[in-house]
Image (cartoon, rainbow, N blue to C red):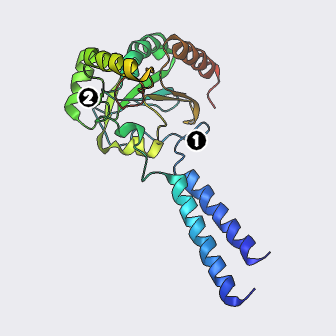
Amino acid sequence: MKASSKILLVVALISAAGALSGCATVSAVRVKPWERGLLADPTMDPNRDPLATEMIEHVYFSREAAAGGRGVGGAGCGCN
Amino acid sequence: MGTAGLVLMLAGFWFACAIRACAGVSVGDVFPPLATADLAGGTPPATAGKIVLVDFWASWCAPCKASFPAYGRLFSEYAARGLVIVAVSVDESPSNYESFVRKLNPPFPVALDKGQSLVRAVQVPTMPTSYLIDRAGRVRFVHQGFHGAATEQALRKEIESLLSEKES
């Protein structure tokens, strides 16, 4: 292997290592459990009007012959 | 060892360091001292030589609210035998913290983690999380979430076992 190819390989491997360590910390992309106060607010709940949701579900079921799969209950604190 | 091997070893080291850096406090680790933590809500109780249950909670967390009566029962039962309970709030809003405490009026000490510095050091995996610490200050049991009677029963068993250990 040529010296320039070796250098390129080393640079590529170091970059990959840096990227992998970034994946391990995940701090840049994940909201920490103690930072979910705003997400847990009732206004963040997509199902704030259960009756309206039920009606929409009924129409959806009639048109698509499928129902459910709308996610989980509660807001976004991840602790319910 | 070739250059590629050396770089792979370095990558593994970085990866391990990165995982370790975000691991926080786990079983076997020494819990950060509460006395030096930036807590509001009065002086933390003396914990030297005692069994300590540190619970991280928030006013917006429903299971945290459900856990308080159970901790109250444990406190009234074991405080005389050397159990200290400190419930640390991670609320960003002091008014939410205060109204929650006023409403539930727990018999055990509560505190607000100002600036969330303690919870950042501990890196709790979920809300709520409680840490049961032995007389030497080491974390012995960690409870993620609160699962009603099952968690209370497990805590009771663990507290009994820690209280039965002799002071070193």
The quadrant holding residue B116 is top left
Answer with left or right where residue B128 lies relative to residue A5: left
Q: Which amino acid type is marked by label 1?
A: Asp
In this view of the protein, can residue B83 be seen by the observer? Answer: yes
Q: Which mark is residue B117?
A: none
SS type, badge 1: loop
Q: Residue furthest bottom?
A: A3
Q: Which residue is mark 2?
A: B97
Answer with mark 1 or mark 2, whichever residue precedes in sequence.
Answer: 1
- The image shows residue A67, relative to residue B111, as above or below, that is above
Give coordinates of residue A33: x percent, y percent. 41, 37
Q: Residue at x 46, y 16 (%)?
A: B79
- The image shows residue B47, relative to residue B116, as above or below, that is above
- The image shows residue B84, relative to residue B1, as above or below, that is above
Assign the N terminus of chain B to one quadrant of the image. bottom right
Q: Which amino acid type is marked by label 2?
A: Tyr
Q: Which residue is mark 1?
A: B29
Q: Residue furthest front?
A: A63
The 10 Å Cα crowd at callout 1, few under 14, some 14 to 19, many 20 or more, is few
Q: Is A58 in front, or is B168?
A: A58
Answer with left or right where residue B8 lies relative to residue A78: right
